């Protein structure tokens, strides 16, 4: 990516927060002898809202028997439409929305939670939905009693929630989260700070710093990172953005080295998030990363998150629409705001 970060001005942004804890009656349908006892609790929030658009967040808690997969449905009460989602696969027909687990967060033990989010559009009003249903059972915060079955035929307890699905517990200290990447990461940081994000560092001059700039733990890029750490304290979380030039690309071994270096430069036990470059609307290509370059970086990030030896969190993809791009790759003012809102939805 280019050696100097894009520094377009950002218009003021007003965030609107709205949350609702959902509690409705559980269905009294009789379960088949081997079925899990259902029960769930949902918290829905709008973390940011702007004219015509908003970011929604859903926290789902399974208070019934362990699940190996889940489908959560709800209906919007106005004209809202989901336009982008992360940590779930979302489809929408009319006002009816269906969110399904992805490969890494389908298993939910009893009392385990997972979170996912989405960007959406609205027109006129944006009321919060209340009619959430998990695997066909309404979410009300109580569980239907399990049917009487023999000990050998009942479902075995599922695994505990993996680190990749656990939501961040409570507000985090300001500037306690570092990041590495190129000018695309700078675009995210610019937008994040502009809309009032507090947890993550602001831009610090990573333009042009692709994967190979971060594989050597003593590189000038890591020296710049360490200067930030000296100012704010060693970060308790680091976002690793996989960023490439088309001619160099990246390998999984290089990505693993980035993760190892991030742990070395962060505070002990730091949480590591990993994602690729922003993806674009169909038909658009970032000339610096090359054809399918952004998709390659996203695939590498997913591979790292699925690798239990790496213990990293894949928050989802960043996305830039055609009208949010200034030069075929980098975000314009509106794109920075959009990336900032996505980052705010991912890690607060």
Image (tube, rainbow, N blue to C red):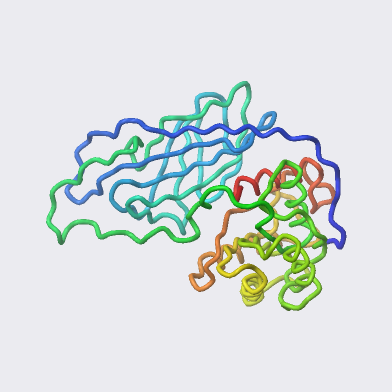
Q: Is residue 164 above or below residue 94?
A: below
Measured as percent of width and height from the top left, residue 12 is found at 78, 35
Position above or below: 136 against 224? above
Residue 109, quarter of the rendered image? bottom left
Q: Quadrant of residue 159?
A: bottom left
Camera-nearest residue between 282 and 249: 249
Q: Nearer the viewer, residue 170 or 277?
A: 170
Residue lying at 85% horizontally and 61% vertically, measured from the top left: 2
Q: Position of residue 285 (x, y in %)?
A: 76, 55
Left or right of 41, for residue 323: right
Q: Nearer the viewer, residue 184 or 226?
A: 226
Residue 56 location in percent, x, y?
A: 56, 38
Residue at the far top: name it: 124
The residue under the point 19% across, 38% down is 30
Against 93, residue 269 (above or below) is below
Q: Position of residue 77 (x, y in %)?
A: 50, 24
The relative height of residue 239 versus residue 74 in the rendered view (above or below) is: below
């Amino acid at each position: 990516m280019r050696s100097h970060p894009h520094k377009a001005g950002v218009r003021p942004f007003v965030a609107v927060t709205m949350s609702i804890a959902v509690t409705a009656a559980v269905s009294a349908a009789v379960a088949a002898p081997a079925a899990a006892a259902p029960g769930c609790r949902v918290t829905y929030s709008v973390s940011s809202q702007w004219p015509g658009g908003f970011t929604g967040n859903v926290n789902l808690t399974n208070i019934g028997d362990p699940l190996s997969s889940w489908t959560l449905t709800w209906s919007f009460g106005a004209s809202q439409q989901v336009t982008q989602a992360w940590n779930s696969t979302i489809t929408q027909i009319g006002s009816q929305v269906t969110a399904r687990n992805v490969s890494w967060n389908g298993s939910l033990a009893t009392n385990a939670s997972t979170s996912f989010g989405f960007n959406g559009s609205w027109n006129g009003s944006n009321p919060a939905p209340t009619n959430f249903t998990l695997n066909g059972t309404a979410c009300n915060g109580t569980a239907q009693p399990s049917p009487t079955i023999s000990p050998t035929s009942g479902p075995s307890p599922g695994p505990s929630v993996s680190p990749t699905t656990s939501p961040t517990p409570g507000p985090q200290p300001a500037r306690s989260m570092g990041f590495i990447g190129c000018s695309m990461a700078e675009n995210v940081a610019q937008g994040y700070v502009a809309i009032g994000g507090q947890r993550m560092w602001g831009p610090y001059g990573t333009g042009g710093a692709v994967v190979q700039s971060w594989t050597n733990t003593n590189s000038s890029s890591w020296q710049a990172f360490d200067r930030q750490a000296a100012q704010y304290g060693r970060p308790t979380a680091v976002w690793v953005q996989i960023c490439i030039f088309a001619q160099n690309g990246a390998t999984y071994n290089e990505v693993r080295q980035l993760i190892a270096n991030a742990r070395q430069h962060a505070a002990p036990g730091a949480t590591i998030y990993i994602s690729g470059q922003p993806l674009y609307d169909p038909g658009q290509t970032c000339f610096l990363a090359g054809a399918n370059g952004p998709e390659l970086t996203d695939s590498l990030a997913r591979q790292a998150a699925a690798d239990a030896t790496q213990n990293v969190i894949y928050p989802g993809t960043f996305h830039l629409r055609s009208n949010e791009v200034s030069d075929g790759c980098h975000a314009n003012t509106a794109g920075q705001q959009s990336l900032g809102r996505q980052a705010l939805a991912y890690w607060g």
